[in-house]
Image (tube, rainbow, N blue to C red):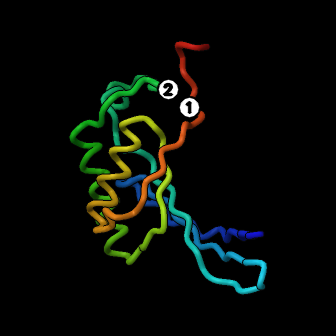
Amino acid sequence: MLAITLRAVWRPSSSSRLLSTTTTTSTTDGVKKPATLVLLRHGESMWNSQNLYTGWCDVPLTKSGELEARTAGRLLYDNGFQFDSCHTSLLRRASFTANMCLNTANQHWVQVHKVRGRERSVASS
């Protein structure tokens, strides 16, 4: 069994949509070790730039969105973040952001798990 305790130590970055929090994980043997959860929103998409709701529509990133992903990767690299795994949506804007961020952070070897998210689709409403 693995227990995770989150401390509210959010560090927002407006340019990269990056949030992280320090956590403490406890294993069954009672050993506590520090861990970090990083949440990264995808970069600006084509529809975001037009103020349109995207939902499950698979639209690409803008050039600005690509720059945001690289900036997030640079911030992670500069602050010494090391990742064990990465989880992202199946949508290309999220997947591309995750991969570009990891590549820029010099962690291209990290396994990326693509997970079907809970995005709401206007078309199915």
Q: Secondary structure at mark 1?
A: loop
Residue at x-position 60% and y-position 80%: 34
Which residue is at the front of the view, 11 or 103? 103
Measure the C-alpha gap from mark 2 to mark 1: 6 Å
Which residue is at the front of the view, 38 or 7? 38
Residue at x-position 59% and y-position 73%: 22
Task: Name the spot of residue 71 as percent of width and height, x first.
Answer: 29, 58
Task: Name the spot of residue 2 as percent of width and height, x first.
Answer: 73, 70
Compared to 94, does 24 lie above or below?
below
Where is mark 2, residue-wise? 55
Instruction: From the viewer's perspective, tell me whether residue 110 is left or right of residue 38.
Output: left
Residue at x-position 32% and y-position 74%: 78
Instruction: Please tell me which of labels 2 and 1 falls first in the chain.
Output: 2
Amino acid type indicated by mark 2 = Gly
Instruction: Give the number of the disc on residue 119.
Output: 1
Res. 29 image quadrant: bottom right
Tell me, yes or no, whether the two marked residues, 2 and 1, touch with CB atoms within 8 Å: yes
